[in-house]
Image (cartoon, rainbow, N blue to C red):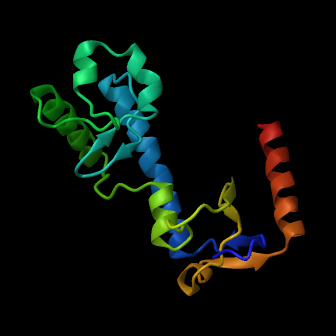
Amino acid sequence: MSDWKMKFYKVKVDSPYNERLKHAARCGEIILKVNEELGEEFDFPKVSDVYLFVDDYFRVMDDMTDVQRKLFTKEGKLKKSTKLGKVIFASYQDKLKARGLTDFTTEKRVNFAFGFYKTSREQLFHTLRNQDERYIKTDVSLSKDALQNVVEITEVDFLQAQLEIAKSREVD
């Protein structure tokens, strides 16, 4: 259970957790490029060896044709039982492998794997990013494994980082 006290952390730059987060960001960029390359109208940000998922499926399903709707389950997962579904899935797998992406992951998966997310209850988990620096604000007591990847900081340090990141984005 949470003690409801907010805790603030800075992610160690050289930690395995940070490396996996960078990998997850690269995965997302590659997926977007492959979407463009294949001329897909839908975003497939969730890709694994097994499934393709449409981003925000319920929002885009009204714009789909009947043929497109039949390609996906109610959850937005591509059906591979159809010929066209198999072709789309194979095209994505080929393009991803050609770009060197065989180990796809997302930021949420990384956070869960490293013990930053819990599944049994709601929690507050907020991250800030600026170049190579990452900060976390959470109400969860982190596991020993998770703590090896971060340094605890004060709320003032977190707010100061938040302000600096906001200023740097205004300049861009």
Q: Position of residue 161 (x, y in %)?
A: 82, 60
Nearer the observer, 160 or 76: 76
In the image, is residue 39 above or below residue 14? Answer: above
Q: Quadrant location of residue 86?
A: top left
Q: Is residue 119 left or right of residue 124?
A: left
Q: Residue at x 22, y 16 (%)?
A: 67
Q: Position of residue 57 (x, y in %)?
A: 41, 30
Nearer the observer, 97 or 107: 107
Q: Residue at x 50, y 57 (%)?
A: 108
In the image, is residue 60 above or below residue 126? Answer: above
Q: Is residue 25 left or right of residue 10?
A: left
In the image, is residue 132 above or below residue 149? Answer: above
- Quarter of the image with the N terminus in it: bottom right
- Quarter of the image with the C terminus in it: top right
Q: Is residue 108 left or right of residue 159?
A: left
Q: Residue at x 33, y 22 (%)?
A: 39
Q: Residue at x 67, y 74 (%)?
A: 2
Q: Position of residue 21 (x, y in %)?
A: 52, 61
Q: Quadrant location of residue 12?
A: bottom right
Q: Position of residue 31 (x, y in %)?
A: 39, 40
Q: Is residue 73 left or right of residue 127?
A: left
